[in-house]
Amino acid sequence: MTNAAVTTRTAYVNARLLDPATGLDAPGALLVEGTRIADLGPGLFQGAVPEGVAVVDCDGACLGPGLVDLRARTGEPGFEHDETLLTASQSAAAGGITAFAALPNTDPVIDDVAGLEFIARRAREVKLVKIFALGALTKETAGKELTEMGLLAEAGAVGFTDGISPVADPLIMRRALSYGSVWGKVIMQRPEEPRLAGGAMNAGEIATRLGLPSIPRMAEIIMLERDLRLVEMTGGRYHAANISTAESVEVVRRAKAKGLDVTCDTAPPYFALTEVDVGDYRTFFKLSPPLRDEMDRRAIVAGLADGTIDAVTSDHQPHDQDSKRVPFNQAAFGAVGFETLLPLVLELAHKGAMPILKALAAVTATPARILGLPLGRLAKGQAADFVLFDPDRPWKVEADRLLSKSKNSCFDKRPVQGMVLRTVVDGRTVFQRPD
Amino acid sequence: MSSPHPHDLDARAASFAHRHLLGIEGLTAPEINLLLDRADGYVERNRNREPASELLKGRVVVNLFFENSTRTRTSFELAARRLGGDVINMSVDGSSVKKGETLIDTAMTLNAMHLDVLVVRHQESGAPKLLADKVNCAVINAGDGSHEHPTQALLDALTIRRHKGSLKGLTVAICGDILHSRVARSNIHLLNAMGATVRGVAPPTLLPSAAERLGLEVHHRMETGLKDVDIVMMLRLQQERMQGQYLPSVREFFRFYGLDYEKLKLARPDALIMHPGPMNRGVEIDSQVADDIHRSVILEQVELGVAVRMACLEVLTMWSGPGNG
């Protein structure tokens, strides 16, 4: 028998299978053949695993679809001192993320086919997790001229966004929603009216005490409401990223009730932290949008629980130490998030806000659906992208030990529950927790 | 035994348990009184031109100013010299500094020189706190962004106390550009801690959000805001910090919010007029009012500033051990 023709077969036995897409939550096993899931289920290998199949004993750990991250920033090209696609991939793999969509906010901006191809080539070279590219919505994310959305879509862009810079001009947004609908890709916007948002933290008592210029909630709500009216006008497909206020949830809820093709996400800081965490000018808590208050935080949890908020993203934003160890107003916005995404999403389940399958859906099947990717689920014939994790194991986040090149976590020292044990992409183990 | 010596350290060390003076927020009334009492003693000594004491002999005070300032820097310098300390002035033009690295670098450099007190002014809120976390000496905030200017509030309090006997029960109107003012924030904290009623009088565009949560009775018109107040504290209109338009014009601002004799009539007849300087004459204050020797205590504020800074230097170097947070 020649080995060349033999497909590797690996059985993951003694697992708790979790698949949010089908509601599966049962003890069982999963068989990988090559890069695909060949079979899975509670009944699989009830007798014994056939000969020639490698066996991984999961020892009762959860086996769920690999996490799909809707939006993450890497530093490549242009900001390699913050993060490269390699370190981003290592960090993502350690977080149980098997696919992420990279924001176009690089230097140069990913606003043409060449840029997109660069990301695709580097992703192939790094070959850890799957990296998809979000194309810029406007050239150089300057908000003035549309990119070649058709060509970018054809070259593999999974969606369009100006990422960290909102598109302020209503006419550009209108045209983007209208023209973009032809290509079947989502238009993503982190809504924030820049003219109202020239500050460093949430407007309110704390910003006033600290003497910091502030960003009112309305900066987000106004642009979100405007965009949703434009969706109504154009019939476009729109995704609001990183929503952070109670009213944003309400606004999206109303838009969905009207039947608009709208989805939205938030990120863990907005359901796990508040502006109080900024404390005495702690720049690692300087995020965009800014951390809000406790009422907003609760509304975000409620929005996730009732499904108004569809997905949770890492909102991974790596920044080196120099851009955070400066006075608050000068510090960069954003925090790394890959390696803390799963435990913080599980925290929603641990705290009883929602069942575990619902929490996992927000980081697997739902974001995959928003991006139009056949990922985020456990099914026969699917790519073997999954994560083994212990949902209960407690650990403490240690920013210095994160694999991301930048250590700017806003969850440093936080006790969390839920640990990634192994991450598998296309049947290959890309991360395994050292014992 | 003799009566307690003014520099009896042990007796009062416990009553000021802070290593730095980064703001008024967090100080208790007894701590504020302690600083004011010490400062009061220095006022007479300075007036009598007594020779410098040797309290800070051999101690090094560095004035690190990232923002232009003449009066505050001079005041700190004089205060340190009156106590026999060595003073070094470092002025760093904020705009030429390549932002933050330099701040930490500067801190580490100064650290290596074994200072005793670092007096910092910076255009960004929180910069002194960042330095305080990195250096091994006491840090005094000489004004940071729109956050705090604690020695200004202390000298204002001393000025008021010397005229009115006490701060308790007084009504103080803080008028003008409260949004951008660190002086306003420090005064709001101090006056509230000492039992005064604090009004903020400003157009809504020059008030920070949730200002009332800091203990401010908010008024948008001088007509109501100045009624029967004991103290009128005017603020400088900080046009250099304004991004975008907060007011239609300076002329209009002066008409409605500038302090003139007409508006002053609303205050109590013995109300004091204060201003932290430098004044924009004809913008927030009429020249004649500012120079009215019967009402204005603006120059006295400057004078008492030296005594207050002497008290702060003394308390932080003498009374506060490295173990005190």
Image (spheres, coloured by chain):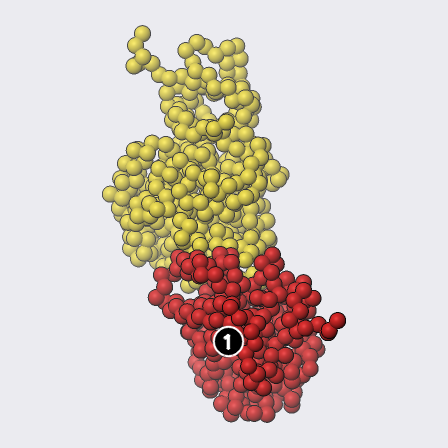
Chain colours: A yellow, B red
Where residue A353 sits in the image (x, y, percent)? 60, 40
Identified at 69% across, 82% down, the residue is B165
Residue B164 vs A111, above or below: the answer is below
Q: Residues within 10 Å of mark 1 (few under 14, many from 20)?
A: some
Q: Is residue A424 visible?
A: yes
Residue A418 vs B225, above or below: the answer is above
Q: Nearer the viewer, residue B128 or A13?
A: B128
Circle 1 — which element?
helix
Q: Is residue A299 left or right of residue A334?
A: right
Which residue position holds label 1?
B81
Where residue A269 sits in the image (x, y, percent)? 52, 47
The amino acid type found where label 1 is placed reads: Arg
So how many labels did they put on this image?
1
Assign the N terminus of chain B to one quadrant of the image: bottom right
Identified at 37% across, 20% down, the residue is A34
Q: Is residue B248 left or right of residue A270?
A: left
Chain for disc number 1? B
